[in-house]
Image (cartoon, rainbow, N blue to C red):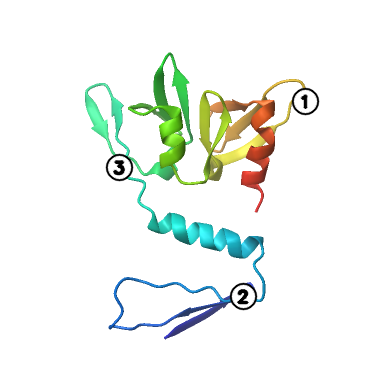
Amino acid sequence: MYNTIMNNMKVKIEIDPDIEGCEVTIKCAEVDSKVVELQKLLLESNAPIGQISFFKDEAEYFLPINSVLFFETDGGIIRAHTASDEFEAKYKLYELEEKLPSYFTRVSKSTILNTHQVYSITKNLTGASKVEFQGTYKIVYCSRSYYKSLKESLTP
């Protein structure tokens, strides 16, 4: 048995050679936002997103999904942007929305971004807000109708 205490949360691991798979039980006095987030993370970590292939020139690439900053449509083609490169993805945006982990969120009709990679947001009250990523010149714009959901997905 392993015990750890972090931020007033006990984590206990019990090894049982007779159990198949893995069972996680969350014990709490009440279900709050931290418990819901923990449950969500556990479910996501166990849910396969399937393999997403990326293409550039004649080559097929297999990148960690968390290295993608954002997906955008460009003339009917879906482009996946990393900090230093861009690739083509053979999906439609709505298919990616269903397939990607919840830390990817739509910010406009043509863009889905990785909230774990957001560095700053410059809010524009009359138009789209500018979203920047750390370590790259690449930016996207979040339309006014998606701004609230973006902020909610960034706030713990």
Residue at figure coordinates x 63%, y 45% from the top left: 154
| Residue found at the far left of this picture | 58
Question: Could you tell me how far apart the alpha carbons at marks 3 and 2 are, in whole angstroms?
Answer: 35 Å
Secondary structure state at the residue bearing disc 3: loop
- Give 129 or 49, whichever is nearer the viewer: 49
Q: Which residue is mark 1?
A: 125
Sequence-first tag of 2 and 1: 2
Indicate the amino acid at tag 1.
Leu
Q: Position of residue 131 (x, y in %)?
A: 62, 31
Q: Which mark is residue 28?
A: 2
Residue at figure coordinates x 52%, y 57% from the top left: 40
Secondary structure state at the residue bearing disc 2: loop
Q: Which mark is residue 51?
A: 3
Asked which quadrant contains residue 57, the reply is top left
Along the horizontal axis of the image, is 77 left or right of 130?
Answer: left
Question: Could you tell me how far apart the alpha carbons at marks 2 and 1 are, in whole angstroms?
Answer: 41 Å
- Dot 2 crowding, Cα within 10 Å, few <14, some 14–19, many 20+: few
Indicate the amino acid at tag 3.
Gln
Secondary structure state at the residue bearing disc 1: loop
Eyeballing the image, is 86 above or below 24? above
